[in-house]
Amino acid sequence: MDESVIKRIHAEFKDTKKFTLPDSLLPFEKGYNLVSWVKELFVYYRAEEIIVRPFDDLPGLRLSNEEGLTVTIQDVHKFIINDLNLISLETRKKVIGQAVSGANVQEAWGNIVPLLLPFIKNLDKETLMEELSWKCGPVSEILWALSWIFMEREQVEVPDDILMVCSRFPYFQWQAKGDIQSMWEPEEPICRREWLALDLYNRILG
């Protein structure tokens, strides 16, 4: 069984008020280090429990050093265990677990679709469109998170003059310099929340 880095750094922090992260979990200077942290989070889940007690003591473990990306792995954990979402905890764990595994994002998405379809397959056409268009809906919230993971796995390069800004995971927006909202999107369709929503829509309606 893999050793839990979260447990190790928590023990260090309790003893010395300091801790050392492995290079694989350091925040990125550009972009964000989410996939490695999610895998580490799942190591803890398997070894311990879904309640990550060390997060009560540890400072925020940031995924990025970019100014607009103050997201921490604690924020991601809160998203996974959020009991206000109508999609069950076990399903959210399975979806996120599939997103960081598989040979590629296409395979990962193919494994995720059957997990999400039961939540929307019985909706009529109009309600289905509303559900998938609603950016804060239960399924859309999952799709936002998947877009983070898929962008990192696809190594999407964001232009130097565009910033990814996030104040609450998994929601984000693209900004041009001067705090102006940008219409830029990744070229890879599977990395966009809207494409993922449309793909679900088309799979249900054929």
Image: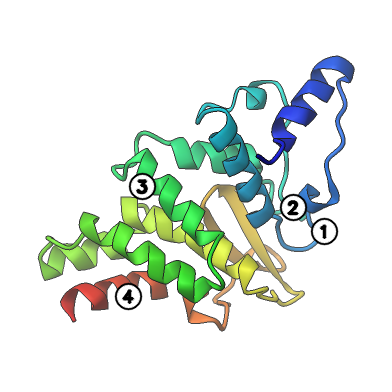
Give the mark nearer the N terminus: 4 vs 2: 2
Q: Amino acid at mark 2?
A: Ser
Name the quadrant containing residue 174: bottom right
> Which kind of residue does numbered mark 3 sit on?
Thr
Which residue is pictured at 72% across the width and 62% down the height?
A: 31
C-alpha gap between disc 4 and disc 2: 30 Å
Q: Badge 3: how crowded within 10 Å, few (<14), some, or many (20+)?
A: some
Proximity of marks 1 and 3: CB atoms separated by less than 8 Å? no
Tell me if I can see residue 181 in this picture: no
Q: Amino acid at mark 1?
A: Glu
Task: State the residue position of label 2.
Answer: 64
Q: Which residue is mark 4?
A: 198
Task: Check disc 3 and report the residue beneath it.
Answer: 91
Q: Nearer the viewer, residue 11 or 142?
A: 11
Which disc is residue 172 wearing?
A: none
Q: Secondary structure at mark 3?
A: helix
Which sits earlier in the primary sequence, circle 3 or circle 2? 2
On the image, the x and y values in percent for residue 94 come to 42, 50
SS class, disc 4: helix
Marks 2 and 1 close (CB-CB < 8 Å): yes
Residue 145 visible here: yes
Q: Position of residue 148 (x, y in %)?
A: 56, 61
* Residue 11 sits above or below residue 121 on the image: above
Q: Which label was assigned to residue 29? A: 1
Which amino acid type corresponds to the residue marked 4 in the rendered image? Leu
Q: Earlier in the sequence, mark 1 or mark 3?
A: 1
